[in-house]
Amino acid sequence: MHKDSNKHIREEQTGKLGRPYFGLASSGKGITMKASAKNKNRHLPGPTDYAFVSDLQEVGFSPTLSENEQYLKELTKDCSDIVIRSIELNPGLKALVVLVDGLAKSDLVQEVLEDLMIYHEREEPDVQKILDKWIAATQAKLTDNYADFLIGILSGDTGMLVDGDDRAIMIELRGPATRSVSQPTSEQNIRGSQEAFIENIRTNTALLRRRIKTPMLKMYPLQLGRHSHTNVVISYVEGITDPQLVKEVIRKVEEIDIDLLQETGQIEEFIQTSTISPFPQALISERPDSVASALMNGKIAIFVDGTPLALIVPAVFIDFLVTIEDQYERFQLATFLRWLRFIFLVLALLTPAIFVAITTYHPEMLPTSLLLSFAGAREKIPFPAVIEVILMEIIFEALREAGIRMPKQIGSALSILGALVIGQSAVTAGIVSAPVVIVVSITGIASFTMPQFSGVIVVRLLRFPLIILASMLGMYGVILGVMIIIGHVAKLRSFGVPYLSPITPATPDLVNVMMRPPHWASNQRPSYLHPQDAQRKSDDSEKIAKIGDKGESSAEGGITNGAPEQA
């Protein structure tokens, strides 16, 4: 739910809230409350009478502090981390402070309480005056129901109730223990920012805001999870991102109904267009510069509190083969590296299947010397080629998974040494042939060149059905498998955007796939995203670059590096 939807507009009646408040009458499974003169007796839900905190939306506070205290203690029974403390403001004016130990920052809470302890007003107590005059916190607000109060408390805010008033003060004094901003771990880079997102959503949005300093950068807040009430932010650049895309993303995210939300992967499965496709329809990134670049192209980022990964939609196939670092290198080098990834993508996907097809059905495709070498290597192997390849692929995947799960200090060493030892031992024992070990090694190295982990997973999965098709039909099976994959990907959509854009349907953006154009020549945002503002820069930038080129090559005009020569 949107966090603002949790706030009901207060109807003023003689200076008080229109929401009915209740007085304690008896206790039991629920608590029967005495309503004001205008309302009938109500049954205030007890600790087990409501399913979710949001069900308390219509339950207001009582002006009597002791009743609120008793009800809060019943709601938070056996919650040892929730602190409920009574304090005294004016002589005889009592207040109740509620916070979660470990989520609220204790030193800030102490400073605010010290200021409140010297509170002295001769007039009737009013929480609005207390909020305006006595609470020196940058973010504080009033609430009039238990739902907003509890959600704020459980999110790290400090709540205060004052005797004689049926409103509560919410003070944002959050100080959870979070790690500092560090280097990216899953998106390593040489050039560019060395910062990565962390588990605190406000730190992540601040890292993004520092890169896009404009009020056009919108941060649309939501809360998802019936029990977790996890903060979610949908970020986009107004005036660039297609408004229809923004509405569709917000609609799909708001429709998510789940009890516990902890990671962006849960949102991804809910909002993706094709739920059974192995191809990811959203990008994940832990780098603020990568997310900023995507937003300026017209995409949308989704942040979830508690995870250092942002979700970027929509995503197309080419997005999984390019990196933000391509924008920082010279365009010649970036274009070379991009084509290198394209080639190694084909190798990672097809090399094992082609090897099985050729050695099983089409040995005549090999040169005679190479064929004799393969035959000699496989002479004493008891298994067919398909079993060898599948066996080694499974072992390689197991080693890779073990390297990820093991401690970092020994994980990489385990993967390398394990592959060397097991490969050499398998060849020596005559279980697999040396060519199979070489093929599997080439496949593994090729898959490491892909920058997006979610894209690598798809290649690793699709290798196995292609190997099986190759063992049954030879090269015809490989071709059939590739055609099925291309047909599936061609039909795929990510929020209405064709997955193979801009390759098919072909658009002028296809040039940007084949190469990384120079920045001075890259003037248009991707047209398949339908941006409102399609132009990246003014035409003067390209003119200046061209003048600079002429200046360096022309000595007659007295121009050097685009500037007149000084006498």
Image (cartoon, rainbow, N blue to C red):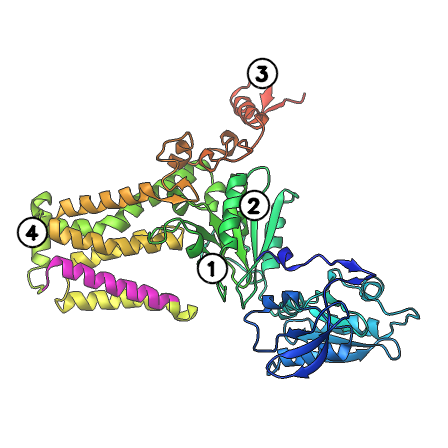
Q: In the image shown, does 491 or 214 lie closer to the viewer?
A: 491
* Marks 4 and 1, how far apart at CA: 45 Å
* Marks 1 and 3, how far apart at CA: 51 Å
- Confirm whether the magenta stretch covers residue 395: yes
Rendered image: mark on residue 185: 1
- Confirm whether the magenta stretch covers residue 506: no
Question: Which residue is found at the position 45% from the left and 60% from the top?
Answer: 266
Residue kind at label 1, given as amino acid type: Thr
Residue pushed farthest top? 556
Q: Left or right: 219 with respect to 324?
A: right
Report the mark closest to the observer, 4 or 1: 1
**60 in relation to 312, above or below:** below
Q: Residue 489, located in which quarter of the rendered image?
A: top left
Report the mark closest to the observer, 4 or 2: 2
Q: In the image shown, does 284 or 326 lie closer to the viewer?
A: 284
Q: Residue 336, located in which quarter of the rendered image?
A: top left
Does the CB distance between marks 4 and 2 fall below 8 Å?
Answer: no
**496 in relation to 413, above or below:** above
Residue pushed farthest right? 122
Q: Earlier in the sequence, mark 1 or mark 3?
A: 1
Residue kind at label 3, given as amino acid type: Gly
Residue kind at label 4, given as amino acid type: Leu
Image coords of residue 333 (percent x, y) = 42, 39
Q: Earlier in the sequence, mark 4 or mark 3?
A: 4
- Magenta segment: 383-404
